[in-house]
Image (cartoon, helix red, strand yellow):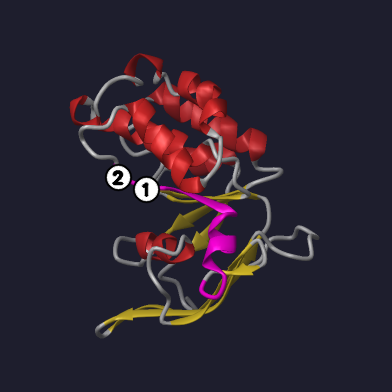
Amino acid sequence: MTTNHPAATPLLAVDGLHMRFGSQVLFDALSFSFNSGAVALVGGNGTGKSTLIALLCGMTAAQAGTIRVGGHDLAARPHRAKAELAYVPDESVAYGFMTGAQFLAMVDALRGRRDAAGAADLIDGFGLAPHAGKRFDAMSLGTRKKFMLVGGLMSQSPVTLMDEPTNGIDADAKGFLIDLIRQQSARRLFLFSTHDQELIGQTGAGLLRLGQPGH
């Protein structure tokens, strides 16, 4: 599956990806490439959506095939490839004792960047200003998820991978996320797993289907 953008080097390219768990084959010679835009990763439960995102961000190693981010081989040049991407998990990865502000500062430090200073618009847009000093173990699930979104989106990385980004968030936050994707998809790739048809429709996302013949 390939986008129609003319750029010589895709932002994200997968070739011959293979992954199996025991007798279950999730991916067999899965190949696709994308440049800027929005892409929804869809498929039934158990078709490997979360596994594919884990592979694309380098959390799990592929059994066969190559993944290139911004032209950099994720296996051979992981630091260069990962510098081109950001990841938003479905569930919180913050320690319970951390405040929202501390989590964002930690994410920024791990990237070796200074993106946290530019996160103010995201914090306001997701309605997080009142929660910046709150500990994660005192936050609602939706508030935790919105901090995960800010942590991923504040980097301005060319490739942003999101696992079920609208799970648990309120309507206003969802609307802000949709607007952001629409505004920035001309220069960034947003690839997200989702069951949310409104998110797909309002962002104009293309579809990458798993669990179909040939995948």
For the image, the number of numbered tags is 2
Residue 41 among those drawn in magenta: no
Query: Eyeballing the image, is 173 above or below 191?
Result: above
Q: Residue 10: x, y in percent? A: 69, 63
- In the depicted view, which residue is nearer to us: 181 or 204? 181
Q: Amino acid at mark 2?
A: Val
Q: Is residue 154 left or right of residue 53?
A: right
Q: Is residue 199 left or right of residue 101?
A: right
- In the depicted view, which residue is nearer to us: 47 or 138? 138
Q: Residue 192: x, y in percent? A: 47, 50
In the rendered structure, which segment of residues is drawn in magenta? Answer: 75-92
Judging by the rendered image, the residue that carries numbered circle 2 is 93
Residue 87 among those drawn in magenta: yes
The image's mark for residue 22 is none
Q: Residue 185: x, y in percent? A: 65, 42
Q: Residues within 10 Å of mark 1 (few under 14, many from 20)?
A: some
The image's mark for residue 89 is 1
Assign a secondary structure to mark 2. loop
Q: Amino acid at mark 1?
A: Pro
Name the residue: 42% across, 33% down.
Answer: 105
Q: Are the two marked residues, 2 and 1, in contact with CB atoms closer than 8 angstroms?
A: yes
Name the residue: 57% across, 27% down.
Answer: 118
Query: Eyeballing the image, is 33 above or below 111?
Result: below
